[in-house]
Image: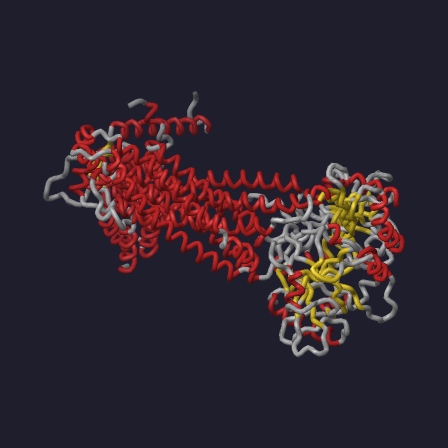
Amino acid sequence: MKQAQRVYEWLARAFPHEFRLAHGDEMLETGAETMAELAKRRGGAGVARLVADAAVRLPIEYLSEMRRDLQYAVRALINSPGFALVGILSMGLAIGLTTNVYSSNWALLTRPMQGVAHASRLVMAEKPISYFYVESYREQKNVFAGVAAFQTAVPFNVRLPGEANGKQQRIFGQLVSSDYFQVMGVDAERGRVLSPTLDRAGDAPTAVISDKFWRSRLGSRSDAIGLALRVNGQAVTIVGIAPRGFEGAFPTESAAELFVPVTAPAAIAPELSNDVLYRRNAREFLALGFLVPGVTAAQAESALDGVTRRLDANDPSAPPQSDKARRVSLLPAGTRAPIPPELKRALEGFFGVLMGIVIVIACVNLGTMLLVRGANRRKEFAIRMSVGASRFRLARQLMSEGMLLSLLGGMLGFGVAYLLNTLNTRLHQAIDTPGLPDVAIDWRAAVFAFVAALVCGIGFSVAPALRATKSELTPALKEGSAMQLPGHRRFGLRNLAMAVQLAGSLMLLLITGFVLMGFARGYQVQTNFDPKTMAMASIDPVRDGETPEKAIDLFAKLPQRLKDSGKFSSVALTTLPPFAIVDDDDSEQLTVDDPQATQRVQQPAIRESVGAGYFAALDESMLSGREFNDADERSLMEPVPGNATRMLPVVLNETAAKKLFGSTNAIGKHLKDGTRSYEVVGVVHDLKGGMGIKQAIAYVALSRDDFTRPPAAGITILARTRAGLDGAAGIRNVVAGLDPKLVPFHVETLSDQLAMSRRDIRSAIRTYGGIGGFGLILSAIGLAGVTAYAVAQRKREIGIRMALGANKGQVLRLVLREGIALIAVGTVLGFAGAVFVSKALEAATSVLADALAMGTNDPRLLVGAPTLLAALALLACYIPARAAIRVDPLKALRTE
Amino acid sequence: MTKKQAERFLPLKPQWFHILLALAGEEQHGYGIMQEVLERTMGKVRLWPATLYGSLKRMIDADLIEDSPTRPRPEMDDARRRYYRLTGLGRQVLDAECERLQGLVHAIRTRRGMVTE
């Protein structure tokens, strides 16, 4: 009974202040009397009912108070539309921008792949391995419920049914083991997925198509299942359609439209030739594992490490590796971008910092405005407090206004994010970026926007609310809003907030600028000739249905035929278009092969296969030695007999040569990688392009393998022509004359190609520039608001000064002085912060490190950004400050 | 005060109806209202304190009841108690609700053939 009495009293005291003011005592008294009576008549059950009633009413009363606060808040905002508009707009922009970053970048990192069951249990080996290894991994039943093998970004020349003589389309897909879909937990939307029992070697070739293929290429026809496609000239039956949104494992590398089982004949996919499924040294498959429940990726990794060590020990072709290093590293494969956890953390950190700064700036901005507004409403608050309103109540009401503003901003923000997303999607569709998902703004983004709005609402309104309601009643009543706030001149909350905001904006501007400038510089390609005069086209004879022998013959004849056409001054073949951006991960370890050397020199280098006359076609002179000639190419076209190894010619770029051989002459020196030996025949200048980073590149001559199993981009023909001539048409004619079956693709000029690679930087400029610009606008608004407030506050003082003879210049200086001090403090803080944050990011992530390292040295940015911000800030101060010089002393004095 | 204004409150929440009814006769404090409802309904309806004061607060806000300036004799008075009485609108709402309930009862009786139209 006593316990119940205490609980009831505690509950009664927890009711909202207003409620207690009106009925608190009575409720306590009535409760005590009722409880005594109930205990007598109905015992414990009655007492419990009494307490329960209070417990149930408590939240109801609070909700009703909140509703009332909200009504007041709506009224207050309607009464000051300017304040509301600026607040909602800036909050909306901030939330919209962060939601956009969240739903595009963040989601790409973390969101599970569509159509996949149990995405979190999928892992993928980072490095390609041979099919034999995959089969051994499959036996680790205590770790994996299933292991599939796949090759991604495999090109297929596809002719759709009903278009017997129609155009072939080059479509990218995957070669997958037949248990691939079971391992991924993906069911067919229509038809069936591939299965180990139905898709065996020797069966009629089958394929599963993606939903996108079905919709866009087959026009969603209902009889798609059972149709026969011509894939690389061979008939392949469609047996199923993958679920919507499923683009295969590792979609950021290449979104797959076609899934062909590895049991298919090599005629359908040259990748499957040369017994690739049975050769231990054919490291061409990625392993995809489905973990047994409860097993972590780290556990699986160590289990596979043991297996791989055993396998490597029995494999003479295995690349030499140190004993300590992990042989296998697993990446999470259930998300769109399988990236190692450390990198993921770094990227999350980067985006987190970006979003955080934007939110903080917006919060501080609104906080400043609320502070200003609160100060202007001191008289109102003082009156309400003097008639009995509690400070808590007033603070709560101010916070309600903040929350309302923030929630409205959140709604607007969601709209902004939706708009940005639509724009982005349209842009990606227009340029058909591979691997970029159509990230939709969905409920997760909405929840994010809502939470962001709540955080902002609380974040920016607590301090101003407490501040505004803390005052001495008498002076506030007397002087109202014109009262000087204690300490507001120098280190007040408001000035601190303003300096933080300026610093934050500058940080945002600088960091985004660093990244941008870094990218921009990296992508600046310098050619020694007009890139418009270089025509490019790719061909892939094997996939156009030619035999490997015929393909080799074609490539042997093609350059001469092009030159004979009289249109081209120089011609070369390559597997990779020049200036393409190559991932560092694709590099191979080169070792100096020198029996007399005291220490082993190793250097990872990117391998590029180029044909005879490649550097001449690019107008690049050799630093020393020679480049590949027809003789090199011819000798490499002969199949290697038995186990004989052959010394391959290699051309190094300047960086690779320096790293491997220092200042000594590299020509004639020997190198080896895992399986091959090389002799350096030439050293060439670094091409000025790619990421602009000095990458070590080893150029090897085009070989038989390149021609019979061309990579995803096919074999690219580079042909220099004279300005004004249509090189593309020239290439087409010659190719058609040589073999009418061939279908050239990616026909363009080098200048088109460079423009394409620059679109990444354009998209980056839009995103990061947008974020930087946003910070700038917000801080300008904030500064203008604060200055306007200061002017309004000091109207009387200004009036007196002017009445005493101060001139306009002096008044302006008086008002601007504070703003300028703030700008100076903010600039210094922001500068230091930006340098600190970018150094931290640089250390944390290699992805941004290159861009940041180059960006941080750019004087245009280091001087330009603070100057721009300071100029804008000054303008933002000046415009409201002009109001000060228009103060009429008589009026100003009379109104008080 | 129009009839329309009163009808906005209909149908009245049960506890509001009981409170209005309790105040129809005389001015009462909260505990008094509670006791009177309990007696009138022979213990069937009990307005629990938190519900009662929550309702009173909302009814004051809705202008159905108000604080009464008249208080009992000093020896009977408890200073902590607030006395409530009906406002004009409160009385109208009570009348309108009674009318509505009567109509309802009439409809039930007609249905069951207890009265003829």
The tally of labels here is: 0
Decide if residue A436 is on the left or right side of residue A841.
right
Q: Nearer the viewer, residue A76 or A69?
A: A76
Q: Which of the pair A602/A236 is nearer the observer? A: A602
Please identify the quadrant where the N terminus of chain A is shown: bottom left
Q: Is residue A607 above or below residue A83?
A: below
> Where's residue A68, x and y in %?
33, 38
Residue drawn at (69%, 70%), measured in percent from left and top?
A591
Residue A888, position in %: x, y?
Answer: 22, 29
Image: A40 above or below B101? below
Q: Is residue A402 above or below residue A690?
A: above
Q: Position of residue B76 (x, y in %)?
A: 13, 43
Q: How is the image coloured?
A: secondary structure
The percent position of residue A190, horizontal first and vertical second, equals 74, 46
**With A297 as the anchor, is A834 left or right in this view?**
left
Q: Is residue A526 visible?
A: yes
Residue, far top: B117
Residue located at (72% from left, 78% from top): A595
Q: Quadrant location of the C terminus of chain A? A: top left
Residue B44 visible in rendering:
no
Picture quadrant of residue A397: top left
Along the line of sight, the residue nearer the viewer: A621 or A441: A621
Which residue lies at the image location 40% right of the left edge and 40% below the top edge? A872
